[in-house]
Amino acid sequence: MAKYSGAHCRKCRREGEKLFLKGDRCYTDKCAAERRNYAPGPHGQKKSKLSEYGLQLREKQKVKQIYGVLEKQFKRYFYMAKRMKGVTGSNLLQLLESRLDNVAYRSGFASNRRQARQLVNHGHFTVNGKKVNIPSYLVRPGDIIAIKESSRELVQDSISRVEHRGIPNWIEMDIKNLKGKILHLPTREEVALPVQEELIVELYSK
């Protein structure tokens, strides 16, 4: 599987805003997106007006970077969302938020989604008491997400810093027992991301 091995702060600078890809560092004055608030590369400081297609493409790329998914998988999520009832853009974000790696991040088990994906890949999480090591596993309302007893030390630091971003209302977190319950799938209002998902829908609808 393809894997990005470059500097993750470049992604934030390319999109012109914080994507919170590096966890706690993004909340400090060391954040590269704040120190160098322009696109990377020799022509990064030049301002250019994007076309309609360019705006749509950048919005899609931004969402892919946030959730750490590649084009083929992202397109599959889009067509899944299109087949669902409701607004396609909102359905797309709901599917991405329902990924196990994202839920582990949102619950405070990891400081960023990359770390959460690694923890899931290494089999440190259970869903309803059964080990799940697939980051793209989609959780459902009522599911109980927990860190394995033998892996608790791995998440203590992240759990202690969860106040930086808080825990969303659709997850009921038991900090003491390191368990999270999915109360319901998130609505668009509960997905606190600065994205215009309608531009992605327009892009794929051409």
Image (cartoon, rainbow, N blue to C red):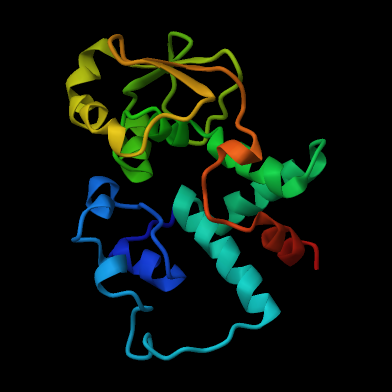
Q: Is residue 51 among the parts visible in the rendering?
A: yes
Q: Is residue 43 above or below residue 26?
A: below
Q: Is residue 65 left or right of residue 25?
A: right
**As rendered, which of 41 and 130 lies closer to the eye?**
41
Q: Is residue 194 left or right of residue 77?
A: left
**Residue 112 is drawn in which quadrant?**
top left
Q: Is residue 190 above or below residue 143?
A: below
Q: In x, y percent, where is residue 35?
A: 24, 71
Q: In x, y percent, where is residue 24?
A: 24, 46
Q: Is residue 158 left or right of residue 143?
A: left
Q: In x, y percent, where is residue 149?
A: 25, 11
Q: Residue at x 18, y 61 (%)?
A: 30
Q: Is residue 89 above or below residue 9?
A: above
Q: Residue at x 57, y 13 (%)?
A: 142
Q: Residue at x 29, y 32 (%)?
A: 162
Q: In x, y percent, where is residue 134?
A: 46, 31
**As rendered, which of 4 and 30 lies closer to the eye?**
30
**Residue 87 is drawn in which quadrant?**
top right
| Quadrant location, the C terminus | bottom right
